[in-house]
Image: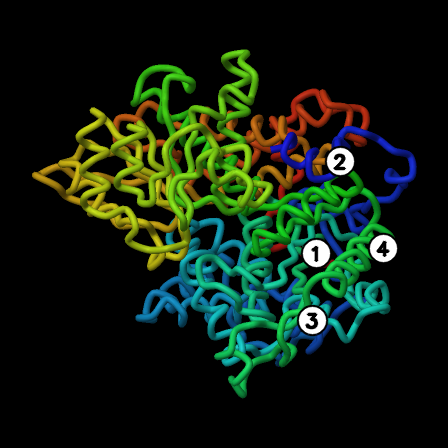
Amino acid sequence: MESTMKNIRGGASVLDMDPKNTVGGGVEDVYGEDCATEDQLVTPWTISVASGYSLLRDPRHNKGLAFTEKERDAHYLRGLLPPVVATQQLQEKKLMHSIRQYQLPIQKYMAMMELEERNERLFYKLLIDNVEELLPIVYTPTVGEACQKYGSIFKRPQGLYISLKEKGKILDVLKNWPERSIQVIVVTDGERILGLGDLGCQGMGIPVGKLALYTALGGVRPSACLPITIDVGTNNEKLLKDEFYIGLRQRRATGQEYYELLHEFMTAVKQNYGEKVLVQFEDFANHNAFELLAKYGTTHLVFNDDIQGTASVVLAGVIAALKLLGGSLADHTFLFLGAGEAGTGIAELIALEMSKRSNAPIEETRKKIWLVDSKGLIVSLRKDSLQHFKQPWAHEHEPINNLLDAVKAIKPTVLIGSSGVGRTFTKEVVEAMASLNEKPLILALSNPTSQSECTAEEAYTWTKGKAIFASGSPFDPVEYEGKVFVSGQANNAYIFPGFGLGLVISGAIRVHDDMLLAASEALAGQVSEENYANGLIYPPFSNIRKISANIAANVAAKAYELGVATRLPRPVNLVKYAESCMYSPVYRSYR
C-alpha cells in the first residue's frame, strides 16, 4: 500500500521526517479522565461547575435518577428529580427493555442517539455491555438508512459542518467546537457513503457512528473525538430536490476548488490540534481517497478506513482462515470483485504480508492476486486505460469480461467481494468456487446488507456447507442439512478502534503499513480454537475491548520500533497500558 502511495507522491515515505512537516503539538488529558480511577471524586466542569437544571441538561455529567441523595443536595437537584435513586444497572435494564420494543432498526437508532444526547455514560454503558445487539444499530447496516433520512431525523448537531461557505475561515470554525483536547477526527465529504452513493451533507451519520465505536470499542474518551462533514455540494438529484435536505444545494465542487478547501482544512487541523491528532478519512470517492491519503500521509497522522481499515480486517480473516484452509498465504490464489479503494487496498496488504512471510518481492506476490472491475478482469492489455491504483494488478492474461469466467480461468481459492453491488456472487459463481476447492473462502464485504455480494444462506447452501464465509454486514445463523453455520463479520470495527487507540497511547505522528500488518496479526491471534471449530475466522464481538487492547499494543509496539512514537518512555507492558487508558462509562461520584 505504501509503495502505491509513494508512486503517487513522487517517492516520499511516511517515515521521512522532514522538519518542516513535523511541528510540535498534541493534546493532553486536561481533566485527568484517562488516568483517574472510577472511585476518585471528579468535579462536573463545563464552563463553570454544572449544577441544578444545567447539570441535568449536560449529557457528559447527567446521571438521571442515579444521582445520590448527597449529590442532589450538593448540586441543587432537590425537586428536579423524582425521589427514587436508581442504579446505572437498573437504568440500563430499563432502556434495553424499551429499545427492544421498537420494531424498526431506525427507531432503535434514533432512541440510541437521543440517549447519547442526554446521558453520555449510559449510552456507552449500553453499547459496551450489549455490543453484539447494538452494533448493527449504531453502525452498519442501520447507519446507512439513518444517513439517507438524516435530513428528516436531524434534531441537533453532533459534529462540525464545514462547507464551501467557510472557505478562508476553517481555523475559526474548528475553534467553535467546545473541546480543545481532540485526539481523533473522523471526516467525510459524503460522496460514497457505504454502498449507497452520494449522500452529501447527510453523510454525517458515518463520522458520528464511527466515533461512538472509537469510544465504546477502543476506549478513546468521547470528549477527545470530533466528527466532521466537509460539504462541497452533492450530485444526488433526489437530495437537491428534497425540501428537508440539510446541506448545500449545489453540484459538487471538484478539482482545484475542492482540493484547496481540503488543504485549508488539513492545515487548520494541525495548527489547532497539533501533530498527534489522528484524521480518519471516511467514505470519500475513490479518486479523492487515494489522492488525499498519498498527499497527507507524509505530513499528518492520517488513516483511511475504507482503504487501510478494510484491508487490515480482511487480511486478519485470511490469516486466521489459513488454519482451516491449510497451506501458507503464498499457496493461495485470490480473486476480487471490485477494484476500488477497498478492493485494491485489501489486495495490496495481502501482497505485502505474503511478501513479508515468503521473502519474495511484492511485485511477485501481487501476481497471486487478480481483480475484476466493471469492465472485466484487469489484465495488462488494459493497463494504459486504468486508474493509477489499478495498474499494479494488471497481469498477463487474455481479457475476460465477467466474474464467472474469471473464476473458471483463474481458479481462485479465495473470492472477495468489495464491489458495492448486491447479489453479484451468483449461484453459478459460488458453485464454481465449490467445485474448485474443498473449502472455498468467500468474503462478501459490501455494506449495507442489501449490497452484500451474497447472503450467508446462499453461500452455505450453494456450496453444500463447504464454504468458509464472512461478510461486511451481519447475517443470522444458517441451518443446512441439520448443521447450524454461524458466519463471521469482516467488520472494520474490529480494527479501527484498537488501531486508533494504539496511535494515541504511543503518541504516533505517522501511519505506516507495518502498523496495519501488526493490527491484522493481533486480530487473527484472538481467534480461539472454539471459534475455529465453529467455522469462524473472527473472534466474537463480545470480547471486543480485550481485542482492541491487544491490537493497540501491537500497533503501539510497531510505532516505537519504527521511530514514529513520541510518548516516552515506552510503557513496559503495552497491553496493560492500553487497558488502563480506556474510557470507562461507569458513573462517577461528584463532590
Q: Which residue is mark 3?
A: 55
**In terms of image quadrants, where is residue 447?**
bottom left
Contact, CB < 8 Å: mark 3 with mark 2? no
First of labels 3, 4 by sequence position: 3
Which residue sits furthest bottom?
A: 243
From what the image shows, is residue 576 above or below residue 359? below
Q: So how many labels did they put on this image?
A: 4
Q: Which residue is mark 2?
A: 10
User: Which residue lies at the image location 74% right of the left edge and 45% below the top edge?
Assistant: 295
First of labels 3, 2 by sequence position: 2
Closer to the camera in the image, 541 or 305 = 305
Contact, CB < 8 Å: mark 2 with mark 4? no
**What amino acid is at disc 1?**
Ser
Closer to the camera in the image, 325 or 275 = 325
Q: Which residue is mark 1?
A: 223
Closer to the camera in the image, 13 or 512 = 13
**What amino acid is at disc 2?**
Gly
Say few, some or many: other residues with alpha carbon within 10 Å of mark 1 (under 14 / 14 to 19 / 20 or more).
Answer: some
Residue 272 bears which disc, if any? 4
Mark 1–mark 2 Cα distance, whole angstroms, equals: 37 Å
Judged from the image, the secondary structure of the residue bearing numbered disc 3 is helix
For marks 3 and 2, give the one nearer the viewer: 2
Task: Classify the position of the N terminus by image quarter.
Answer: top right
Say few, some or many: other residues with alpha carbon within 10 Å of mark 4 (under 14 / 14 to 19 / 20 or more).
Answer: some
Judged from the image, the secondary structure of the residue bearing numbered disc 4 is helix
User: Which residue lies at the image location 70% right of the left edge and 44% below the top edge?
Assistant: 302
